[in-house]
Image (cartoon, rainbow, N blue to C red):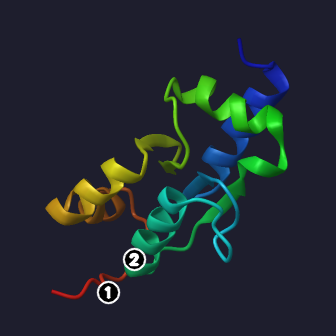
Amino acid sequence: MIDPAVAERIRSETMSNDVVLYMKGTPVFPQCGFSAQAVQILAMLGVNYKGVDVLADPSVRQGIKDFSNWPTVPQLYIKGEFVGGCDIMREMLQSGELQKMLADKGVPFENRQVG
């Protein structure tokens, strides 16, 4: 069961920022390969986002998994909606779904993807 204070913190972060990435490490220094890939995807799209380092707070590290009912990190939220982890982000980028979702939700981005 998620701590109500942790749930409120996550809810507040995901609702008050257009894009939030819960990750291991920071956008400048990711601490796992999957988090690094998620950061690269967002960088390719030129998306401004808030990175939340789950390693800095054990209650958030477990809390985000309970909040989303998703077992792994990183986790991407766009306008408060849970999108998924690294593999889902990669698939959505390749299919164009991620760009469409950003556009549909009014989140500014640039498609810097090569090829």
Determine which of the numbered discs, if any, sits on residue 46 in the image. none
Q: Is residue 79 left or right of residue 113?
A: right
Residue at image position (71%, 11%) is 1
Q: Is residue 109 left or right of residue 93?
A: right
Give the percent coordinates (x, y) of residue 74: 54, 49
Determine which of the numbered discs, if any, sits on residue 109 in the image. 2
Position above or below: 96 against 79:
below
Can you name the residue that lies furthest to the top here? Answer: 1
Give the percent coordinates (x, y) of residue 15: 62, 45
Residue at image position (15%, 60%) is 95
Q: Quadrant of residue 62?
A: top right
Q: Residues within 10 Å of mark 1 (few under 14, many from 20)?
A: few
The type of residue carrying mark 2 is Phe
The type of residue carrying mark 1 is Arg
Position above or below: 100 against 88:
below
Residue at image position (49%, 29%) is 70
Quarter of the figure with the C terminus? bottom left
Give the percent coordinates (x, y) of residue 60: 75, 37
Give the percent coordinates (x, y) of residue 104: 30, 58
Separation of residues labelled 2 and 1 (CA atoms): 9 Å
Name the residue beneath numbered marker 1.
112
Residue at image position (57%, 55%) is 21
Question: How many numbered dots are placed on residues in this image?
Answer: 2
Q: Is residue 4 left or right of residue 65?
A: right
Q: Which SS class for mark 1?
A: loop
Mark 2 vs mark 1: give the one in front.
1
Position above or below: 26 against 83:
below
Position above or below: 31 against 23:
below
